[in-house]
Each structure stands twice: as C-alpha cells, then as structure tokens.
Image (tube, helix red, strand yellow):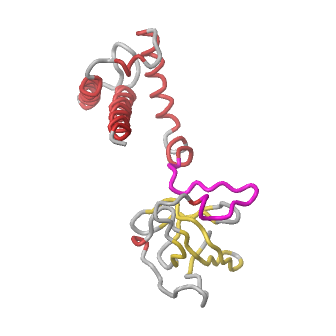
C-alpha cells in the first residue's frame, strides 16, 4: 500500500490512533502515497506492536500500515459481513485465521515433514485418526514431544525407527497435544451452553 499518512475527512473524528488501539475487525481510514495518492477504507486483519495489516474494502489487497490510521467503526464482536454491504466478488475474512498466508506459505516444507509423520503412523498402526483414541493421549503425546526434542538436542537429527526428523516428530506430537486440548475445550464449552 505504500507510505501511509492519516486519512483526513471533516466528516469523521479527527482522533488518530496508535497501532495498539486497533483490534482485528476494526474498520479504518488511510491514505497511501505510492505513485499516486490513494485514500481508502479497510478492515484490520492482523496487528503487531508497530503495524496493523489492513485489507482494502474495494480490492481486498492488503498491507502492513504504521501509526496514523483513523478508526471508523469498531465491530464489537459483530461479523463484518453483516455490518458491511457485500458486493459481488468480495469476501470478508477479518477475524479469521490466515491459514494459507500465515501457515502454509510460512512453513510448507515443515508441514510436509509433519504429514510424512502422519503417513508413517498410518503405515505402523493401519488406521487414520487412531491417535485420537489413545488413552491419556494428551500426556502420552507430550511425553513423545519431549523425547523427540531431547533426542534432537542431544545431536540426533533422525529418528532411528521412522527415519524421519525428530523435529518433524516433535511438531506432530505438539499438534496432537494442541488438537486434543482444543477438542476438550470445545466439548466443555458446548456442555456449558
């Protein structure tokens, strides 16, 4: 989006906000000065300490912007789709995890290595998703995670049994622990409704 300066419009509040003031889902006004000046509105999709990632409402292009944005609307938990008039060809993803941009493109080789661990597990146990049925799975996968981490820390790169990287085995076990934890939390939340 280029260099950013605050969007100036007398119809809106003149209050400028620090980056830390923004939350995912906020609608902000901005101006960029890249080739030609562009004024627009966008939705905050991600934040860090110094910048916010804003997707433009018109063309869905995004960029990390520094301080100097103006808050137009805080969604307060409402879905963006219901608060904005949807136009043909638009999809509002604010507040949703960036699975492709923030996971698959960050760690493609690592994810394939973890998938190889899943394949090895299937060949060994002849069942997909059987790992979910393991008694005390959260504790047992945490133990396996630590065993593979310690083996790697002691200088062993590959697991002798599977011939796969200890780091990939550790990542698989970390994901299993997390998945079981999230699943248990969901069940508790569903039961309390």
Q: Residue furthest right?
A: 88
Q: For the N terminus, give its image quadrant.
A: bottom right
Question: Is residue 13 one of those drawn in magenta?
Answer: no
Question: Is residue 83 one of those drawn in magenta?
Answer: yes
Image coordinates for residue 32, horizontal then vertical, percent: 62, 76
Image coordinates for residue 178, horizontal then vertical, percent: 35, 35
- In the displayed structure, would residue 141 be above or below residue 188? above
Q: Is residue 192 left or right of residue 36?
A: left
Q: Which residues are magenta?
A: 81-98
Q: Nearer the viewer, residue 130 or 18?
A: 130
| Residue for point 57% across, 60% down | 80
Q: Is residue 81 left or right of residue 182?
A: right
The rendered magenta stretch, by its main secondary structure, is classed as loop
Q: Nearer the viewer, residue 24 or 115?
A: 24
The answer to which quarter of the image holds residue 8 is: bottom right
Q: Nearer the viewer, residue 130 or 164?
A: 130
- In the displayed structure, would residue 34 be above or below residue 55? below
- In the displayed structure, would residue 107 be above or below residue 122? below
Image coordinates for residue 132, horizontal then vertical, percent: 38, 22
| Residue for point 32% across, 18% down | 134
Q: For the C terminus, give its image quadrant.
A: top left
Q: Is residue 155 visible?
A: no
Q: How many marks?
A: 0
Q: Is residue 169 visible?
A: yes
| Residue for point 34% across, 19% down | 159
Q: Is residue 33 left or right of residue 24?
A: right
- In the displayed structure, would residue 86 be above or below residue 105? below
| Residue for point 59% across, 64% down | 83
Q: Residue furthest front?
A: 193
């Amino acid at each position: 989006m280029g260099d950013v300066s605050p969007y100036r419009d007398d119809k809106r509040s003149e209050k400028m906000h620090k980056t830390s003031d923004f939350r995912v889902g906020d609608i902000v006004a901005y101006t960029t000065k890249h080739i030609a000046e562009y004024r627009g509105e966008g939705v905050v999709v991600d934040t860090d300490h110094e910048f916010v990632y804003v997707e433009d409402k018109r063309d869905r292009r995004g960029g990390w912007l520094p301080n100097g944005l103006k808050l137009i609307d805080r969604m307060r938990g409402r879905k963006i789709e219901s608060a904005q008039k949807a136009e043909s060809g638009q999809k509002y993803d604010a507040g949703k995890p960036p699975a492709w941009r923030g996971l698959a493109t960050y760690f493609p080789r690592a994810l394939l290595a973890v998938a190889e661990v899943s394949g090895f597990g299937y060949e060994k146990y002849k069942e997909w998703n059987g790992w979910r049925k393991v008694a005390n799975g959260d504790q047992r996968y945490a133990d396996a995670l630590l065993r593979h981490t310690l083996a790697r820390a002691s200088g062993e790169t590959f697991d002798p049994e599977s011939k796969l990287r200890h780091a990939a085995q550790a990542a698989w076990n970390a994901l299993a622990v997390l998945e079981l934890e999230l699943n248990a939390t969901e069940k508790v939340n569903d039961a309390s409704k």
